[in-house]
Image: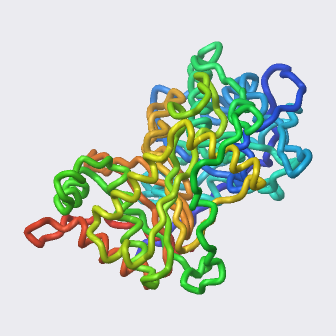
C-alpha cells in the first residue's frame, strides 16, 4: 500500500522588497470609498503555473522579485504604510519601506495538487505565509508576494494586498505591470494614476438621495445558525450546460439576464432555503458593481483605487424562497441598475456623513463579487498562462467570490465557492441540483465539489 506523501513547503525568511529606484516621499489621501471600514482587510489572489522547458534556465523567484521591485517604482504607495489621521481617516505614508516578499519551495508537483488549486485553496497558509503581525492595518506592509517553486518545475504566485489601497481590478493592473516588466518592458503600458480625491465628499456635491440597505440590514451576529468554526466549503461549477438548464426554468423575458445575475439569484435563494431562514426574516444580497463608467467624475485610465460599490437587494425570506427563481433574478438586476452617477454621489457622501461604515455581513446578509473577469487567469510572466488564476480563499460564511475555471476537458465556466455548516451544505446541494436538472427530469453530471475539510 502506497504511503501518502506529506505536503511540505519550505519558506525562506520574508524580506522587505522596496522600489528598484528612489521614489517620492509624501503622504497621500485615500478616497471615501477606499477608506470605508468594510474594506479594512486584506484579500488574496493566486496563480498556478506549469513547467516550461524553454524557461528552464530562468528562476521564477528571481524574475518575479525583480519585476515587482521595478513595478513598485510606478506603484510606490504600495511600498508605504498606512497612518491614521483625524476622525479615524487613513492615509498612505509613501515611505518606500517595502512590501513583504517570500521565496519558497514545495515538495509537490502541480499534478500532486490536483483539485487543491480550486478556491478555497487547501494549502493557502503554505502558499502565502502570514508574516506575524502583518494582518494589522497600521504600520504593516501593504502587500505580500510569495513565489513557490514546485518539484515539477512549475510554480505558484500568491499575492495579498490591503483592500484599502486597491480592489481586484487595481491589483490586476499592478500584476499586469509586473508581467510586462518581467518580460522585458521598460515601463508599464498603463501608467498608474492616484487621484483618490476624485471620490471624496469634499469633491462631490452633498447628496444622499438613496436608501443603502447594505449598511442597514439588521445584524444576526448572535444567531447560532452559522457556526463559523464548523463550516465546509464546496466549489460549484457553472458552465454553459448548467446555465442553459437554469435559463429554461425562467420565463422568456428573464432568460436574457446576465450570467452573473442568474448565478447570483440561484446561490442566494438556494443558500437561504438551506439555512432554513424564517419566513418573516429580512435577507439581503449585496453585489460588487464597478463604477468606472458610472462615476460622477471621470476616473482616468490607470486609476487603481477602489472603484466598486455594493448595492443591495433586500426582501423577506418567505418571498425569496417561495416565489419562482425570476423573483430573485429581478431583485439582483434592480439592485445593480440603481448604480448611476447620482447613486455613486450618494454612497460617497453617505460614507463621509456616517463615518465610513462597514457592510453588514451575516448569515442573512450575503455579499458576492466576481473575480472571473479580472484577468488573473491570463497573466504570463514568461512561462505561459496559469492553469488557474483568481481568488485564493473564495470567500467565507457570509460572502462568495466567483472565480474563472476551466475543466480538464477544456470547458470554461465560473466556479462559486460556498461555505456552510455541514447539514445546510447538503440541503444547498439538493436545491442547486433542482435548478440544474434537465427538463426531462434527469440531472446534468454535477461538478465534483471540492471539500476543504480543514474548515
Q: Is residue 32 above or below residue 109?
A: above
Q: Is residue 367 above or below residue 340?
A: below
Instruction: Name the residue at 47% across, 36% down.
Output: 375
Q: Nearer the viewer, residue 333 or 234?
A: 333
Q: Is residue 183 above or below residue 131?
A: above
**What's the colour scheme?**
rainbow
Residue 245 percent location from the top left of the image: 19, 59
* Image quarter in which the C terminus is found: bottom right
For the image, the number of numbered tags is: 0
Left or right placement of residue 226 versus residue 354 in this view: left
Instruction: Name the residue at 60% across, 58% down.
Output: 124
Res 103 visible: no
* Image quarter in which the N terminus is found: bottom left
Residue 367 percent location from the top left of the image: 53, 60
Residue 231 percent location from the top left of the image: 53, 77
Residue 16 percent location from the top left of the image: 82, 39
Give the quarter of the image for residue 61: top right
Q: Residue furthest top?
A: 186
Instruction: Name the residue at 87% across, 36% down.
Output: 93
Q: Nearer the viewer, residue 4 or 96?
A: 96
Res 82 visible: yes
Left or right placement of residue 199 versus residue 110 in this view: right
Left or right placement of residue 272 versus residue 290 in this view: left
Instruction: Name the residue at 28% across, 66% down.
Output: 325
Q: Nearer the viewer, residue 389 or 340?
A: 340
Q: Residue furthest left?
A: 440
Q: Is residue 47 above or below residue 263?
A: above
Amino acid at each position: 500500500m502506497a504511503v501518502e506523501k506529506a505536503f511540505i513547503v519550505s519558506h525562506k525568511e520574508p524580506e522587505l522588497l522596496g522600489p528598484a529606484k528612489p521614489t517620492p516621499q509624501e503622504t497621500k489621501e485615500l478616497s471615501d470609498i477606499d477608506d470605508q471600514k468594510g474594506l479594512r482587510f486584506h484579500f488574496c489572489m493566486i496563480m498556478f503555473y506549469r513547467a516550461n522547458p524553454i524557461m528552464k534556465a530562468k528562476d521564477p523567484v528571481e524574475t518575479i522579485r525583480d519585476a515587482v521591485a521595478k513595478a513598485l517604482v510606478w506603484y510606490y504607495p504600495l511600498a508605504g504604510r498606512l497612518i491614521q489621521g483625524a476622525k479615524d481617516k487613513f492615509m498612505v505614508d509613501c515611505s518606500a519601506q517595502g512590501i513583504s516578499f517570500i521565496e519558497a519551495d514545495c515538495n509537490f508537483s502541480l499534478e500532486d495538487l490536483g483539485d487543491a488549486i480550486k478556491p478555497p485553496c487547501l494549502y493557502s497558509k503554505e502558499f502565502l505565509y502570514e508574516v506575524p503581525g502583518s494582518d494589522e492595518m497600521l504600520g504593516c506592509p501593504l502587500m505580500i508576494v510569495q513565489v513557490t517553486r514546485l518539484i515539477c518545475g512549475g510554480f505558484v504566485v500568491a499575492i495579498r494586498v490591503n483592500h484599502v489601497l486597491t480592489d481586484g481590478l487595481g491589483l490586476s493592473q499592478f500584476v499586469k505591470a509586473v508581467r510586462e516588466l518581467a518580460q522585458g518592458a521598460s515601463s508599464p503600458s498603463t501608467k498608474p494614476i492616484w487621484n483618490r480625491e476624485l471620490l471624496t465628499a469634499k469633491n462631490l456635491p452633498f447628496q444622499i438621495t438613496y436608501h443603502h440597505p447594505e449598511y442597514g440590514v439588521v445584524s444576526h451576529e448572535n444567531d447560532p445558525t452559522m457556526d463559523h468554526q464548523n463550516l465546509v466549503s464546496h466549489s460549484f461549477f457553472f458552465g454553459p450546460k448548467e446555465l442553459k438548464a437554469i435559463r429554461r426554468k425562467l420565463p422568456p423575458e428573464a432568460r436574457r439576464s446576465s450570467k452573473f445575475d442568474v448565478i447570483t439569484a440561484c446561490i442566494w435563494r438556494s443558500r437561504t432555503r438551506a439555512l432554513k431562514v424564517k419566513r418573516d426574516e429580512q435577507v439581503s444580497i449585496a453585489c460588487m458593481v464597478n463604477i468606472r463608467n458610472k462615476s460622477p467624475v471621470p476616473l482616468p485610465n490607470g486609476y487603481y483605487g477602489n472603484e466598486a460599490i455594493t448595492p443591495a437587494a433586500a426582501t423577506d425570506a418567505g418571498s425569496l424562497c417561495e416565489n419562482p427563481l425570476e423573483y430573485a433574478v429581478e431583485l439582483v438586476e434592480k439592485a445593480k441598475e440603481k448604480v448611476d452617477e447620482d447613486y455613486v454621489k450618494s454612497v460617497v457622501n453617505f460614507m463621509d456623513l456616517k463615518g465610513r461604515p462597514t457592510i453588514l455581513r451575516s448569515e442573512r446578509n450575503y455579499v458576492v463579487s466576481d473575480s472571473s473577469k479580472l484577468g488573473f487567469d491570463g497573466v504570463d510572466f514568461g512561462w505561459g498562462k496559469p492553469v488557474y488564476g483568481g481568488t485564493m480563499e473564495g470567500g467565507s460564511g457570509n460572502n462568495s467570490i466567483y472565480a474563472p475555471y476551466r475543466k480538464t476537458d477544456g470547458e470554461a465556466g465560473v466556479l462559486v465557492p460556498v461555505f456552510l455548516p455541514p447539514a445546510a451544505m447538503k440541503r444547498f446541494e439538493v436545491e442547486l441540483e433542482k435548478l440544474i436538472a434537465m427538463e426531462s427530469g434527469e440531472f446534468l453530471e454535477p461538478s465534483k465539489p471540492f471539500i476543504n475539510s480543514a474548515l
